[in-house]
Amino acid sequence: GSRAIVEDRKKGTLERLLTTQLTTGQLYAGKFLAGTARGFSQTFILLALAYAVFNLFTPLSFVLTLFVALVFAAAASTLALIIASVSRNDDQAVAISVFFTMATVMLGGTFFEIPKGSALATIGMASINTYVNSALKTMMAAGGNLGEVTFELAMLATITVVGLILSRVLFRVVQGGR
């Protein structure tokens, strides 16, 4: 994600792409869509295995869970674009990505339950994992529907839109350039 964009910028690939009829916005949109597709594909494989092996879903709940995964992949893709936009080299992009991933996983309650009302739960509200984990638990464990995860989807969509705007403002094809 973020490292690839920084590497493309360093090698001049992004700048060369702009010599074609691509605009910076189109190039940026392509990077966002590619990141979203990559994240969604990985999640699809895991959810399809869960569906096939563990029978965790009905066909309808599987499709609805995939929708949640798509919104999450879009939010994660925008965060990768922000990291790529502020990183000056690929090592920095990797370091920021690893730190950010570990923080969001731990604060989002991915591996352990975070007590509601605790300071950690309040801090965890800044993690996209908090919202996707809540939505997936509702959909998979409680047999919920999209109406029951409206708040979580709205938060992920808001993060996606704000992240797109912020990363687009910060996005540069060449270091210090356009």
Image: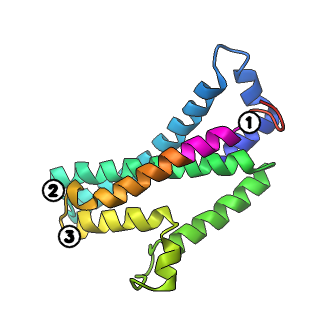
The answer to whether residue 42 is visible is no
Residue nearer the viewer, 82 or 13: 82
Q: Residue at x 53, y 75 (%)?
A: 123
Query: Residue 84: horizontal and vertical position, in percent?
Result: 69, 47
x 76%, y 50%: residue: 87
Q: Which residue is mark 1?
A: 172
Vertical arrangement, residue 68 with respect to residue 31, above or below: below
Is the stretch drawn in magenta largely helix, strand or loop? Answer: helix
Q: Earlier in the sequence, mark 3 or mark 1?
A: 3
Disc number lying in front (2 or 3): 3
Is residue 29 found left or right of 51 in the rendered image? right
What's the CA distance linking mark 2 and mark 3?
A: 12 Å
Q: Secondary structure at mark 2?
A: loop
Alpha carbons under labels 3 and 1: distance apart: 44 Å
- Colour mapping used in the image: rainbow
Q: Is residue 139 left or right of residue 10?
A: left
Q: Which numbered mark, 1 or 2, is in the foreground of this view? A: 1
Residue labelled with disc 2: 58
**Contact? badges 1 and 2 (CB < 8 Å):** no
* Viewer-proximal residue among 108 and 13: 108
Q: Does residue 169 belong to the magenta stretch?
A: yes
Residue 8 x/y as whole percent: 73, 36
Which one is earlier in the sequence, the residue at label 1 or at label 2?
A: 2
Q: Which residue is mark 3?
A: 142
Around disc 1, counting alpha carbons within 10 Å, would you say few (fewer than 14), some (14 to 19), or many (20 or more)? many
Q: Which residues are magenta?
A: 163-171
